[in-house]
Amino acid sequence: MEIPLRATAIFFFLWILTRGVGKRELAELSAFELLLLVTVGDLVQQGVTQEDYSVTGAVLAVGTIAFWVLLFSYASFKFPRSRKLLEGQAVVVVRDGAPLNEMLRLERITIEEVLTEARQQGISNLRDVQLAVLEADGKFSFITREARPTQRQDEGPRID
């Protein structure tokens, strides 16, 4: 019974840690951070199973963590009000071409990071952005002012 309790404690520790680290940091891991993540995984395994190298111990540990992941997923689906707490929420960081400095500060994002993401999505100037949103998964979504309906390929130009 000790392994499921340890796995539960580690699950909640990691959940709190990932919520505290921030969206942006988790969205783009450098090679070094990926290595650290693998190392953390090994350290967590040692903390959960201690000296138990049995298959039963591994199944209990992984099964317990999977149980919590499924429970959180179900709670997020079944109880929409819990979604914000469990998964995070999207945050507007640019509105009508102007950066929202308070939101950038809260999310620990520089304007240069927003500009880089905008350029990667083909937006050369923030003045063209009606809305920039940092999604719960750490990625950016941009809505530009010139959002026009796209034409289907099988349609020619319309003449009215």
Image (cartoon, rainbow, N blue to C red):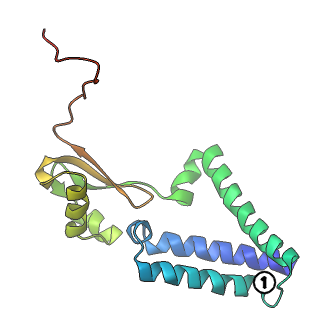
- Residue 4: % across, % down: 80, 74
Q: Quadrant of residue 78?
A: top right
Residue farthest along the front direction in this orientation: 154
Q: Which residue does the image show at 27% across and 66% down from the upper left?
A: 104
Q: What residue would you read off at disc 1? A: 49
Horizontally, residue 153 falls left or right of residue 123, namely: right
Residue farthest along the top direction in this orientation: 160
Answer above or below: position of 7 versus 156: below
Q: Report the label total.
A: 1
Answer above or below: position of 153 versus 135: above
Q: Which residue does the image show at 62% across and 46% down from the upper left?
A: 77
- Residue 37: % across, % down: 53, 79
- Residue 36: % across, % down: 51, 84
Residue farthest along the bottom direction in this orientation: 51
Answer above or below: position of 144 versus 26: above
Callout 1, which amino acid?
Thr
Q: Which residue does the image show at 22% across and 65% down from the upper left?
A: 101
Q: In which quarter of the image is residue 85?
A: bottom right
Instruction: Quarter of the image for the N terminus: give it.
Output: bottom right
Q: How crowded is the residue under tag 1: few (<14 C-alpha within 10 Å), some, or many (20+)?
A: some
Q: Quadrant of residue 120?
A: bottom left
